[in-house]
Image (cartoon, helix red, strand yellow):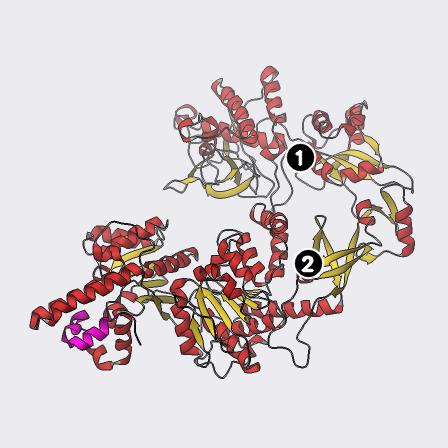
Amino acid sequence: MLPPDRHADGSVAVPRAFEAAVWRSGERAGVWPPLAPGAARMESATDAVEVAVVCDSGGPTTVDATRMPIARVIEPLLAPPDRDRGSRALSVSADAWRRLLEWTLEQIAHGRIEPTTTTEGMDRWSLTAVEGRERHTRDRLVADLPLPAYAVVLAGVPSRVPTAGQAARWFVDGVVDSFVRTAAAPLVLGHDAYAGQTPVIVTGWGFGRPADDLGVQPAVGLRIVPPRLAGGLAEAVVQLRDPASSAGSMTARELWSALGARDALPDWLGRDPAAALLGVLHRSVGVWPGLAVLLEQREPSSMTLADTEVVALLGPLGAELASVGLEVLVPDGWLRRWTMSATVDGLAGAAINPLTAANPPTVGPRMDLSSVATLTWRAELDGEPLTDEELDVLAEAARPLVRLRGRWAVVDRRLFDRLGRSDELSLADALGAALSGSIVIDDRPTRVDLAESIDALARRLRDLARSTADRGAGRPEDGELARWAVPASLEATLRPYQRRGAGWLDELTRLGFGALLADDMGLGKTIQVLALVLAWRERERSLPPVLVVCPTSVVENWRREVARFAPSLPVRTYVGPDRELSGLAPAEIVVTSYGIARRDVTRLAAVEWSLVVADEAQNIKNHESVTARAMRRIGPGASRVALTGTPVQNRLADLWSLLDWTSPGLLGPLGRFQRDVAIPIERDGDDMVAARLAAMVSPFVMRRHKDDPEVAPDLPPKTETDHFTALTAEQAGLYREASRSIMGEVADASGIARRGLVLKLITALKQICNHPAHYLGDDGRLSGRSGKLEAFDELITAITEAGDSTLVFTQYVAMARLLERRLAELGIDSGLLLGETPHRRRSVLVDRFQEGAFPVFVISLHAGGTGLNLVRATHVVHYDRWWNPAVEQQASDRAWRIGQDRPVQIHRLVAEGTLEERIGDLLAAKARLAQSVVGGAESWAGELTDDELRELISLGGAR
């Protein structure tokens, strides 16, 4: 669905593929074509009206609203189809209004207009009374208006809706006044009334109200009267009511009597209530032929109803009749609804571990969510169990309407047949019922009571869900998770929200479930997992090893994080040609990539892991992919934790895939999930289904944002992260060749010449680390040739999908252009700012970025390192290092500065095992060297000896 084109003045042009709905501020009476809340009374083209543009394909949906003149609304009804733009035909509703519009314009062309007044005494042009053929045509057009064209009730809008005649009258009045108002009117009338854009009071000028030609039409309905005695028949009484007020109503019998006696009728009945009544009945016979009995009567008034007919009218048939204007009315409280509920008894073969044991295990056994429970049904009437005697009455009843407890009840044989029958229910469905309050069986929400063992587990899960939800209260110090014991061996101080996250992981995995930690990027998901593993190791020294699977670009980051925050844990990277799994130590952390997990799935699946972690878990969101299938084979008995900042990227099936990996079977089969959950939420916007899903998944998903109350006070204004990336084979070959050839020249040079060669060497190696195309100056493909670019792709995609904006700095113009090209290949909009960018263009780019025109701004360090305010960005990526801390700081300050009200993440991409990594270490460890580079960029490297230079640029080796 496309939004309407918005003009500079705030109005919208309504495409032919859409319909326009108009209403005016004031009483909220109904809708005008076809879907807008509020009053529908248009009295002149100068009224302040609002327009909602809606699409009528696949169900009407309001997509935008703005203020515009009524004349603009009717333009698309007059405009011919634009075949070049592929515009489709008008919908049934819009076409009905178009035909009434054409009739109205014909009346204007024949001069059938007159100046009148509104109810407020304001000037308004109206049609004169029409008779004969024109009246017949008009009445037919009004009768042909489908109900959705003028009286669709929206959620949150009172259900008072106009009749077709009322809606048509407001439409005709608005069109007439819009077309007839003209600047020439003062020349004819001698004053500004009926011409200006501002309404004028003309009360007392001799202009009266127009004749109510189209007339008000009453609402017509069938009121069901229940049987007086058991075995009797119900009755359907035809009645009319005032559509604008609940005070006025009249039965059809009373109407016929008043007409026969020529009694005065209430104004709300309009000019011809008999025609209105008969017209509705004739339309309704096409929906339900049973109404033909009424039309056979000389004065249609009432009819008897069989039980089956009553039941039908209370169901979908009643809704169908309402769609053509015949309401089905039921006396309040005369009908009772009996429903089914069920009890879930014990589970066969399921280990329920609600953490009530004296010595709970470190990690609970994997919960078998496919375990089968017994479901026993019982009947309830208005929430109270039926007695055996009442059940006997229902069983012996030969009709669908039965009198119980002084009222009538509808007997649903499909439900009744369940009584006394035991069904099977999986533990996953039982927990879903416990967490959401009901379970959907045969498309009906059904209340389920749980056996004590399952209920204890459900209570524990609900407690976890409440603990995670408490973060919004802004008091992270409260709650059980906030008091979780942080392992003494963790060499870091957890922020309160991180402590809660680690405690949540611990509790959930001890219950035997997997977990989805979906914190925003930069909130420390890695350190929370490390705290979890250390807590396990403190409780069980012989803990089996832990497997971490992540993108290739993140493998080295994990190794470094373990060494930094959990140095007591052994760690190895399972990558490269010499990867090995033998001799794994207790609690050893093995880090590998998704690609290797696919290739070595058999070897990895043979290891007994205590925990399997999927970092950047969006890599397994497609459950049918080779990667997802491989991950399901690894660690079938292990606890599983998925880490991602984007748990739902495109559709709810992404969430299903992640949770089906962490806790297989939790959300049931995918097909059933799509049918019963995803489609009702994504296509139909079903809030009830969405609420049930949220209640079901809340214990198993922890989602924190950077602006959450518990996070923002503890998150530093700026967080800096080094992302270490591996060289590709092409990069490594170029790196070695450049080092060998240029170092040979350096050895034979001295003075200024030597310093120039050293700078040439440093520049060449940095370009190689960036991308071979940067160093070679070729126009070949970009993907697959640079480890740093692959890390950039993953990082920038994750940031953009999270809805954040990024500044990307590089000191090289050529690399900036390559990054712009790569972003285009990824389908990400970007801006490019270089030193050669003209000043005016520079200002335009900055303004457009700040307005959100594009999410990624690529800037050369010289062009944008200073003097810019770009606080829309919450991420800064340094693609290559300037090695001057002051210069990098100034560049980062483009986003981290006064006016920034969100945390800022600084990302530095560093080629692992190269001079980029070693110079970073030198800057951090040697104060003298750090001081020397503040003012000289890479010039300091010219003062290094040959041996120091060789050590600096050597590829790989010890660190």
- Residue 299 shown in magenta: no
* Residue plotted at (80% across, 23% down): 296
Classify 10 Å Cα crowding around label 1: few (below 14), some (14-19), many (20 and above).
Answer: some
- Circle nearer the N terminus (2, 1): 1
The image position of residue 231, as x and y in percent, is: 92, 40
The image position of residue 567, as x and y in percent, is: 43, 80
Residue 642 appears anywhere in the view: no
Give how far apart the Cα atoms at labels 2 and 1 are: 37 Å
- Residue labelled with disc 2: 429
* Residue plotted at (50% across, 66% down): 604
- Residue labelled with disc 1: 323
* Location of residue 636 (image quadrant): bottom right
Classify 10 Å Cα crowding around label 2: few (below 14), some (14-19), many (20 and above).
Answer: many
Q: Nearer the viewer, residue 282 or 262?
A: 282
> Are dots 2 and 1 in contact, CB under 8 Å?
no
Vertical side of 174 occupied by 569: above or below: below
